């Protein structure tokens, strides 16, 4: 048996076995990626995708479980020992976006979404995540006899959110007992982003992506003629005061030097005629936080401000906040342990200490259960200014396939080095 450290590192000028295997498997990884990209499926509807993933994993000889959280797939690779057990996760769902990239393998898929026919696209890189994770599995199967521990490959559906009225994603996988059955020691993940160039890896200790909470607010007044507002209670004015007042929470009551916070009203609906003050107004929006303590504070003060403003105006208000995703946070000690691996693989010049993002990720649920490490992978070609590249979720989102090699190498080295120990 070859020592795990020797698999990851070779003498100066020599290629490591991991890098050699990654190079040999590059064409297959790209083929997987293109197939996934051409046949995207929405959340909880990843039927073809999960079948393809499961088939590829079975062909590698892995123990495969399907039907987890509707369409999820997990595979278990037993190494020389049961422990440590490293979990690695890739998401599988596409988005209701009509692709405009003109790639030869661009998606032409359409489907029904909220009663409308829409295009479907892997506009957030999930096709690359699945392909890279299959590439990592391919590498580790080839190195199975020298694998110091075991690996749990998680292919997760519905990262973009389950359809209305359904459960899904990482939260449902955990609810169904995935980590209770396998009990991994750590979980790794990687996300493709267009704001970094190919070859670059983003990292950060602590909160890296925000919690995401949806809210619904109803303000009830008393309808009256618009010419005589004193005969009623105007819920539109009260709603406007709440919208303005809530921003004081973020700008004056939250320590923004600790972590950012955002409260956004996305829609306000009320009234039907210019000279009628309506009975009620409905508002919806989102709350984002990079710190779980700040999240709790914002929720509490949002409720308090809504009630106080409504009461002062003689109105009634009902606020419901629906917890969606917690903060996605990297375990500081785990990141510290693995930074030398990342530097060895991509070079210090290609390591980018990122800023927190106010987008959300349900990898956060896994990282609440065990120490998690979630890295970002640059996918914009080196000759393009990444700050100008179409963002994730854009119909023009583009992933440079040369970046897949970087992703497979980094993830494989991380798993082997973690198993080898500090």
Image (cartoon, rainbow, N blue to C red):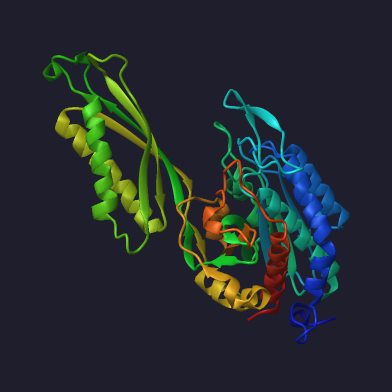
Between 89 and 132, the one nearer to me in the picture:
132
The percent position of residue 69, horizontal first and vertical second, equals 66, 43
Q: From this viewpoint, is residue 396 visible?
A: yes
Q: Is residue 218 left or right of residue 354?
A: left
Quarter of the image with the C terminus in it: bottom right
Between 52 and 387, the one nearer to me in the picture:
387
Q: On screen, 120 above or below 402?
A: above
Q: Is residue 192 left or right of residue 5?
A: left
The percent position of residue 372, horizontal first and vertical second, equals 57, 64
Q: On screen, 242 above or below 356?
A: above
Q: Is residue 250 left or right of residue 135?
A: left
Q: In percent of the image, x 77 and y 57: which residue is there?
A: 134
Count the marks: 0
- Identify the image quadrant of residue 336: bottom right
Q: In percent of the image, x 59 and y 77: which residue is there?
A: 348
Q: In percent of the image, x 81 and y 51: which residue is there?
A: 31
Q: On screen, 320 above or below 387?
A: above
Outermost residue toward the front in this view: 383
The percent position of residue 87, horizontal first and vertical second, equals 67, 61
- Identify the image quadrant of residue 104: top right
Q: On screen, 33 above or below 408?
A: above
The percent position of residue 171, horizontal first and vertical second, equals 57, 47
Quarter of the image with the N terminus in it: bottom right
Q: From this viewpoint, is residue 64 visible?
A: no
Between 129 and 300, the one nearer to me in the picture:
129
Between 96 and 366, the one nearer to me in the picture:
96
């Amino acid at each position: 048996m070859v020592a795990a450290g020797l698999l990851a590192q070779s003498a100066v000028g020599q290629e490591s076995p991991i890098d050699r295997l990654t190079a040999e498997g590059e064409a297959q990884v790209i083929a997987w990626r293109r197939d996934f990209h051409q046949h995207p499926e929405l959340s909880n509807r990843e039927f073809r995708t999960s079948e393809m993933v499961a088939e590829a994993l079975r062909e590698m000889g892995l123990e495969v479980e399907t039907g987890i959280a509707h369409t999820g797939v997990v595979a278990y690779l037993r190494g020389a020992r049961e422990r440590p057990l490293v979990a690695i996760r890739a998401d599988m769902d596409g988005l209701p976006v009509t692709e405009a990239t003109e790639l030869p393998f661009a998606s032409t898929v359409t489907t029904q979404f909220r009663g409308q026919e829409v295009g479907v696209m892997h506009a957030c890189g999930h096709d690359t995540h699945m392909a890279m994770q299959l590439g990592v599995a391919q590498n580790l199967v080839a190195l199975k006899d020298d694998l110091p521990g075991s690996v749990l490959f998680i292919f997760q559906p519905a990262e973009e959110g389950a359809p209305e009225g359904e459960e899904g994603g990482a939260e449902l996988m955990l609810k169904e007992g995935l980590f209770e059955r396998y009990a991994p020691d750590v979980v790794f993940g990687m996300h493709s982003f267009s704001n970094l160039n190919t070859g670059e890896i983003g990292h950060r200790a602590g909160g890296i992506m925000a919690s995401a909470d949806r809210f619904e607010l109803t303000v009830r007044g008393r309808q009256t003629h618009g010419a005589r507002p004193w005969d009623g209670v105007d819920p539109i004015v009260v709603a406007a005061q709440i919208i303005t007042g809530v921003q004081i929470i973020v700008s004056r009551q939250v320590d923004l030097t600790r972590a950012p916070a955002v409260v956004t009203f996305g829609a306000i609906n009320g009234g039907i005629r210019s000279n009628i003050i309506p009975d009620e107004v409905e508002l919806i929006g989102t709350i984002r936080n990079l710190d779980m303590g700040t999240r709790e504070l914002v929720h509490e003060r949002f409720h308090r401000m809504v009630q106080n403003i409504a009461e002062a105006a003689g109105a009634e208000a009902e606020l419901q906040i629906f917890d969606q995703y917690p903060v996605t946070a990297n375990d500081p000690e785990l990141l510290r342990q693995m930074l030398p691996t990342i530097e060895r693989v991509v070079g210090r010049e290609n390591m980018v200490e990122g800023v927190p993002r106010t987008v959300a990720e349900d990898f956060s649920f896994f990282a609440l259960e065990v120490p998690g490490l979630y890295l970002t992978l640059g996918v914009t070609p080196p000759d393009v200014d990444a700050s100008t590249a179409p963002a994730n979720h854009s119909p023009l989102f583009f992933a440079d396939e040369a970046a897949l090699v970087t992703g497979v190498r980094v993830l494989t080295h991380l798993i082997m080095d973690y198993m080898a120990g500090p």
